[in-house]
Amino acid sequence: MWSKTDHPQGAARGGGVDILMYHSISGGGGATNIAVEVFAAQMEVLAASDVPVISLDDLVAARSGGPPVPSRSVIITFDDAFDDFARSAFPVLERLGLSATVFVPTGRVGASETWAGASDPPRRLMDWRTIRDLAGHGICFGAHTVTHPDLMALPLADQKRELVQSKATLEDHLGRAVDHFAPPYGRASAETRRAIAAHFKSSCGTRLDRAGAESDLMDLPRLEMFYYQSPARFAAYLRGRGQGYLRWRQTLRGLRSAMVKPWAQGQGSLTARPQSGAPEA
Ligand SMILES: [Zn+2]
């Protein structure tokens, strides 16, 4: 932990936080897989930097009058709770003394991904015993709905059921409050975000940016780590010299979404979205 006096000038309530987004740590192809050697190199760069790793709880607490977060910090997140998290990612995190949040689609725990955009062959998710074990080792678990739908394709009542049931199931299994959420594909309208806010303290999206003091806690941007597979590039970013690359990636994403609009055509189009694009699941 840090104290206010550690960061007397730079501290801002909820200020510059890079929320790293990972999916699978495996050798599989596709933009939602990052090889374990690459992940380990990224985490080693992070651990060797002077940028502290905090939690979503720290960020939320800072926004509600708690201790401010450092002027520059990182939060590590994983979507989908694939079982390679336990096998490949957790040992690296544990060795380096880093923690992370994993967003779980509760209806697929112990089974394989079946949702739009799934890998071929489908990747397995952790089982409940593994999830409980990891929670006992300091990993934070958040909800990622029950069935991993595109929430925007569902009526609001069904969206709310996905939110409430995933939170309740996780809380039953973990015996603790579950305060953080991530909508599948980063898809959540203002109305959906209001529903999320009724049950959770934060929600992580897929918009590519650094979270700042003004960021909406119900629409937190993240940093897609597929773009930072070069440890040197990630190190430069952490040193504050990588902003140009981030802006360039944001521009490419903006152009692509303007041209492709993959979400506008309903659920069926999700599997057909361009594989060259950024992972947004
Ligand atoms: Zn997902």
Image (tube, rainbow, N blue to C red):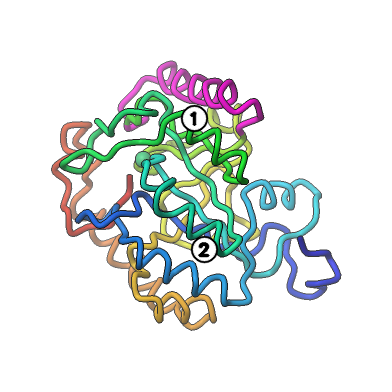
The residue to which callout 1 is attached is: 129
Structural distance between the alpha carbons of marks 2 and 1? 34 Å
Q: Please determine whether, in this image, residue 12 is positioned above or below residue 84.
A: below
Magenta range? 150-178
Q: Quadrant of the N terminus?
A: bottom right
Residue occupied by mark 2 = 210
The picture places residue 222, in percent across and down from the top left corner, at: 46, 56
255 to 101, vertically: above or below: below
CA neighbours of label 2 inside 10 A, class few (<14), some (14 to 19), many (20+): some
Which residue is rendered at x = 59% and y = 41% of the image? 202
Which residue is at 54% across, 51% downward?
100
Ligand 1 location (quadrant): top left
In the rendered image, residue 277, in percent from the top left (x then y), is placed at 22, 57
Q: Earlier in the sequence, mark 2 or mark 1?
A: 1
Apparent side of residue 108 relative to residue 30 in the rendered image (left or right): right
Q: Residues within 10 Å of mark 1 (few under 14, many from 20)?
A: few
